[in-house]
Image: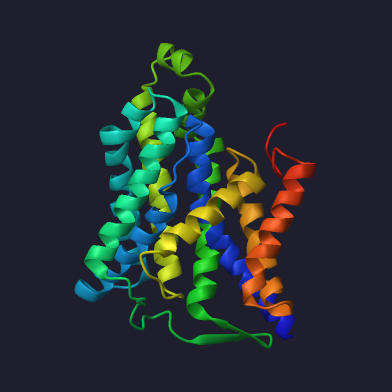
Amino acid sequence: MILLQVIVGGLLLGAIYALFSSGLTLIWGMMNFINFAHGEFVMLGMYVTLLVVLHVGGGPIGFGAVAALALFALGVGLYFVLIRHVLRGPMLSQILSTFGLALLLRYTAFFIFSANFVSLPPTVLAGTLNVGGIFLPVAQLVAGIVAVVLTMALHFLLTRTTIGSRLLAVAEDRSAAMLMGIRPDRMQALAWGLSAGAAGVAGALLATAYPWSPSVGETFGLIAFVTVALGGFGSVLGSLYAGLIIGLIQAISAFWLGPIYKDIVVYGLFVALLWLRPQGLMGKA
């Protein structure tokens, strides 16, 4: 029964991994752009949630929506101010610009909030549920379920809507998309907004269940890159599967071997899988 509880907890955490990784795979697949600041977007979503709860109040729907909107606006703004100019340069300038952005966001958070770990005050999600003998924190359960729903919604947006068709058209051929009346700048700005917004919501969900500090963005950024590569570049559905797998492996490894070994197991299996299937689970060869 304890192992089953560990497995369920790992899957719920993996669902949140999938949500913020889906934003990274959208940028990576659409623009072939490496965003090293993606983990910091998750961290900012957590601090936006804290500020909303402390100064405004409201429930999870309220602070989740504010985190999503705030990070969406940040993503769109960063595209027009920084990213669209960097896109014209070499790959090295893209890497250095987003790496510098990550440092700027991280140390700005250190300056404003200090390096201490913080957590949300008790919300309506406080408490534990007994589901068939499995004890699950309400916050963790709700966060995992919402993360799966939102990840599937993003997948639906990209594959079943006109906006998704336009985004994919720009990803396939920017020049051809322009000839069809699509404005690539708008679509790419929307992609950055959706990517940052997904990270913001994931941060809000994580904040309900776990403590954090400004340095947490580095950890989440690394997990996002592993999840995207494992699931397949540009595949939101692949990110969902990969996120669930990584969360499950982390939980079982921590249970059987100890918490300090969970990342070793994850990254070891990740390297082994990429050696056998470099395109990831759902990527194209």
Farthest right residue in view: 276
Front residue of 136/285: it is: 285
Above or below, comparing residue 201 to residue 88 in the picture? below
Q: Is residue 207 visible?
A: yes
Residue 83: quarter of image = top left
Left or right: residue 95 versus residue 279 is left
Residue sitting at x 31%, y 53% = 105
Front residue of 176/6: it is: 6
* Image position, residue 110 (x, y; %): 28, 64
Residue sitting at x 33%, y 57% = 106
* Image position, residue 169 (x, y; %): 50, 24
Q: Is residue 62 visible?
A: no
* Image position, residue 232 (x, y; %): 64, 41
Farthest top residue in view: 179
Which quadrant does the C terminus fall into? top right
Left or right: residue 142 versus residue 119 is right
Which quadrant does the N terminus fall into? bottom right
Residue sitting at x 63%, y 76% = 259
Above or below, comparing residue 103 to residue 209 in the picture? above
Residue sitting at x 52%, y 86% = 128
* Image position, residue 204 (x, y; %): 39, 65
Please, which colouring scheme is shown? Answer: rainbow
Residue 87: quarter of image = top left
